[in-house]
Image (cartoon, coloured by chain):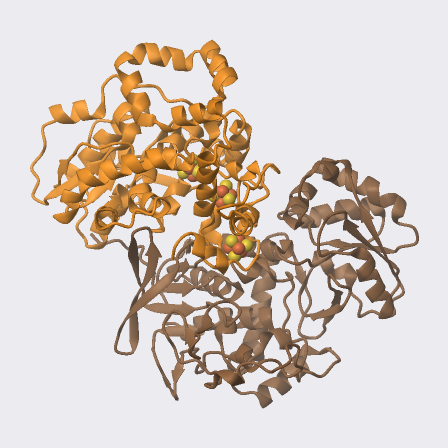
Chain colours: A orange, B brown
Amino acid sequence: MFVEQTLDNCIKCNICVTECPVAAVTDKFPGPKYEGPQAARFRQPNQPLTDWSVDYCSGCRVCNMVCPTGVRIAEINARARAEMVRKGAFGWRTRLRNNLLARSELLGKVGHPIAPLANALLQNPLGRLAAEMTLGIARHAPLPTFSRERFTAWYRAHQPANAPKGKVVYFHGCSTEYYEPRVGRAAVRVLEANGFDVIIPPQHCCGLPLLSNGEFDAARNYHRRNVNSLVEYARQGIPIVGTSTSCTLTLKEEAPELLDAFDEESRLVAERTFDLSEFLLNLHTRGELNTEFRSIDLRAVYHPPCQYRAHRVGRPSLELLRLIPGLDIVESHAACCGIAGTYGFKAEKYEIAMQVGQPLFDLVRATGGPIAICDSETCRWQITHGSGVPSVHPMELLALAYGYEPEGVLQQQTL
Amino acid sequence: MRMNTYPDVIVIGAGLSGLTAAWQLAARGHRVRLITKGWGATHWHSGCIDVLGYFPIGNTPPVSLPRETLATLIANMPEHPYALVGIERLEAALDAFATLCHDAGYPLHGSLDSQWLLPSAVGAFRPTCLAPETMMAGDLSRHDREPMLIVGFERLNDFYPELIAANLIKQGHLARGTLVETPTLRRQKAINTLVLARLFEQATFRAEFIAAVKPKLGKAERVGIPAVLGFDNALAIKAELEKAFDRPIFEIPTVPPSVPGMRLHRILTRAIERAGGDIRTGMQVVAADTKGDRVTTIWTEAAARRVPHHADTFVLATGGILGGGITTTYTGEVREVVFGLPVNAPTDRMAWLYRDVLDERGHPIFRAGIRVNSSFRPLDGETPRYTNVHVIGTTLDGCEPLRERSFEGIAIATGFAVQDALPTTNHSTSA
Ligand code: SF4
Ligand code: SF4
Ligand code: SF4
């Protein structure tokens, strides 16, 4: 069913309102039912825009997951925001800011070659204050640092292992490429430990940050280029896996659905795309996963990002982590960490994002492990920012359990 | 090595019956996966456990001694879910449920030997069997003369204290209604039950509320307010207000979202997870694979694909016509949505509804349900359609939960009793 059609299913039960983490902390946002199915009735082609509040929807999709009648509330809200962008409801300053935050690929390309300088600027309190005052980028929000080496540079120099199980395409996403190449290295190692040959075709940002900022035209462009680059592999039946749950969700569903990209090629790519944990757990179901894990004696919170829940495949990372001996995982039931992609980076939304994440930060601190675990990059940064505890991707632990050398914060642990 | 965490039972639907079944089965060592499209009936209902309010239906005085009337019902209606469960198991189910709530710090009170009569949000009385402690002081069955003050909030829709008081007076009770406003509420853009429940969890707001109500207490000897006394500490909040007012206070259920319903929902979902159950929301079942008289796999809709779920046993708790477990088509078909089980409903579309919306007899289509045998296996004629499917809750035939006021009783009783129909398990439990 198409996004807008689902609004007719709404029975006004308010269940979505009971769970929306944003409405729970601010009354700038009255809640999913009002912004989604209800306000959508007034968003007709020749009508004036409804009010601003829909821009306070973080896009976390918690509402979709609890609605008993299948209303695609988050998507209705995303489209409403895009309509506001199209009709010029946002001033140039806001759009510049949103575009800066949403163009992670462009940012990476510009910032990476001058990494030390860019990092110094991005972490400098005065610079951050200026960025907040001129652009509205929250000065305390957890901006990442550029890594020294790009992920694909490492990959090109990397010696692939013997690969009896065939090929897998890895979609690494911008964050792995520019900020956290260690996540990509872990993914490649885990796949190789399972006998796969990892291919990395040219790729672009998945476009999700643009979609959630209502910049649909730019997002369409990125999505199209990715489909072009991936569709040949999909045709050959080669699985496309990713470590960023938002990238894979975008390829699977968000881009086709929000952009009405219902062409054959987009569909083929969507059907062959998997989150890496989902892919590995499927292997395990068939008894094909390499389970020769060494033990990791550690207690840590795992937070399933909302982007992952929206895949509607359960909690594959949690099930995989529980296969590692010694690892004691505390599952987070927190609705959201608050950051919601680019949401928590915006000055007017920073406080809301921090309040939304508070229960999760409290859980992480109370658990007291040396690390927290989460599949999504911005969530990891937010969890660390809010709780002071460093965060890693599940693949980093899997790679460690397969006997690879620890990297990053895991290096500092005696495990 | 294959994973050993696959479920042996899948429960479909997260209304009161599905949650009860998942909780009980998980607590008894089954590996349970609860699959649901979203949350449901728990967020709508009053938070009381109605077992049997009216029998026979249409007879005006409410049931006053449920145990006796249940015996009559069971003798006269052998296909009624209560007849399948029996009074003993019904009572065991209610006990287990009350114990769970008690242990969660939210006691329910009552038994099959008496009936509460509690005021509703329009001031009518509702017969119910188990009531949360936060509602008890509202009981109207005592025919006492304790005057009530009904307090509402400015801008809270669908809760009008004057209306409630006027209706209570008509029934011979002494009552007065009043609306309050506080500085915090004045700053709040929208007021609804959720906003209020979250505010009542804050000491500063409670102080404002106390200050606003105290001067209005007058001769009132008990105080009724909408059911918004927080989610997790309702009892402590109630005690604090009672101390300040020096009078008993009681909650009155509201229109959805119902805070007392959500409290039960939280207690149940936590119990399921503590016992090792796996709850998955946002998952709609779109197909099922069968082999002979067994269901082997169900498929749920996911991003860009369908996902399979295998299990030995499936418990169907998707609700009836109102809950979405049974639907009708324009061509006059009445369908059970997951397995396409035979539904007992009028085959003639014209016989679904009576002409008058409020017809006293109740519309036949609302009685549509799945006929089952004594182990809740769905029947096709007189033989089970599938041997490893069990149907519970208001999906069942032979009852009219809304008019009988038996909704929660049937849900909890069948959600509890279904375990007896399952093979016993020797999995270790983490409960
Ligand atoms: S997507 Fe998240 S923030 Fe937006 S309405 Fe839904 S629950 Fe609320
Ligand atoms: S949960 Fe779904 S049906 Fe209920 S009010 Fe929200 S959108 Fe409407
Ligand atoms: S930031 Fe993380 S936890 Fe928060 S909305 Fe996104 S995926 Fe969810």
Residue ID at (45%, 62%):
B22
In the figure, residue A308 lies in which quadrant?
top left
Q: Is residue B159 left or right of residue B339?
A: right
Q: Position of residue B163 (x, y in %)?
A: 81, 61
> Can you say whether A49 is above or below B172 in the image?
above
Residue B289 coordinates in the image, percent (x, y): 28, 69
Residue B193, placed above or below residue A398? below
Disc tally is: 0
Does residue A321 appear in this view? no
Compare residues A333 and A257 and report the one nearer the observer: A257
Q: Position of residue A361 (x, y in %)?
A: 49, 32
- The quadrant in which the C terminus of chain B is found is bottom left
In the depicted view, which residue is nearer to us: A74 or B407?
A74
What residue occupies the far right of the structure in this picture? B219
- Above or below, comparing residue A93 to residue B235 in the picture: above
Considering every residue shown, the one lying at the far front of the view is: A46
Tell whether A256 sits left or right of A13.
left
Q: Residue at x 49, y 59 (%)?
A: A8
Residue B263: x and y in percent read 60, 54
Pick whichever, A107 or B1, lies toward us: A107
Q: In front here: B380 or A81?
A: A81
- Work out whether residue A393 can be spotted: yes
